[in-house]
Amino acid sequence: MAVLSYNEILPKCIINYNNEPYEVLSAHIFRMQQRKPVNQTKLRQLVGGKVVEISFHQNETVTEADVGKMSAQYLYTNRGESWFAEEGNAKNRFSFPDEQVHDKVQWLAPNSTVEVMTYEEKPMTIKIPVKVELEVKDAPLAVKGNTVSGGTKLAELVTGAKVDVPLFISTGDIIRINTDTGTYTERVTKS
C-alpha cells in the first residue's frame, strides 16, 4: 500500500480513512493568505455510500486502500437484498442490502455482468457501465397536443425503473440510459 501525501489525494483514488475505504470524488488544493496549503476533498465511503468533506493539511498522509476487483453476474433482488454470483464460480454468491446498491441495480437486467470492488477479500460495492441498453416494458401512447412540457412521457423499463423518454418511444423499443444521471440518451432499435 502506497502512502499518499496531502497533494496526491486526487479524484478517483481510493484511500484508507478511519480504517475504512473511501473513494475521492473531488479534491481542491488551495492556500489562504499566509497559511499552509490545504487539500479540500469530498470522499464517498465505499461500504455505506456516505459522502463526507475532509480537509487534509500539508503534514498529513494517508494510505492507498488495497482494493481488488472481480467480475460477477447480477442474479436478482428479493426481500431487500440484491444477489450476485462470481463469474466462473457460481457457488460464490453474495448479497448487498438493497438500499446500498439500489441506484445501480435498477439499471441491471438479470444475468448482467458487473464489476465488484473487494476490500480485504470481501465484496464492498459494485460498478456498472455508464451507459446501458434496456427494453421499454411499458410506454403510454403520446397524447396529441401534449408537447408543452417538452414532449416527454414516463416509460417503465424491463428492470422496473421509470425514466422520462421522448414521445416517439414505444413499448418494445431498446433505449440507452446514462446510469450516472438516470436519463434517456438515445433509442438503439425500433421494435
Image (cartoon, helix red, strand yellow):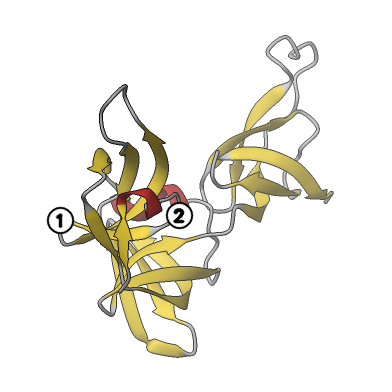
Binning the other alpha carbons within 10 Å of mark 2 as few (below 14), some (14 to 19) or many (20 upward) gives few
Residue that badge 2 annotates: 12
Residue 166 as seen in the image, left or right of residue 105: right
Which residue is found at the position 41% from the left and 45% from the top?
25
| Residue 86 sits in quarter | bottom left
Question: Label 1 amino acid?
Answer: Asn
Binning the other alpha carbons within 10 Å of mark 1 as few (below 14), some (14 to 19) or many (20 upward) gives few
Q: Which of 132 and 163 lies nearest the eye of the viewer?
A: 132
Residue that badge 1 annotates: 18
Marks 2 and 1 close (CB-CB < 8 Å): no
Which residue is found at the position 30% from the left and 74% from the top?
1
Residue 113 as seen in the image, left or right of residue 25: right
Q: Which of 104 and 13 lies nearest the eye of the viewer?
A: 13
Q: Which of 16 and 164 lies nearest the eye of the viewer?
A: 16
Residue 39 point in image, percent of width and height: 33, 40
Q: Which of 64 and 147 lies nearest the eye of the viewer?
A: 64
Q: Which mark is residue 6?
A: none
Which residue is found at the position 37% from the left and 49% from the top?
7
Looking at the image, the residue that sits furthest to the left is 18
Residue 53 point in image, percent of width and height: 27, 37
Residue 148 point in image, percent of width and height: 72, 9
Which residue is found at the position 21% from the left and 49% from the top?
59
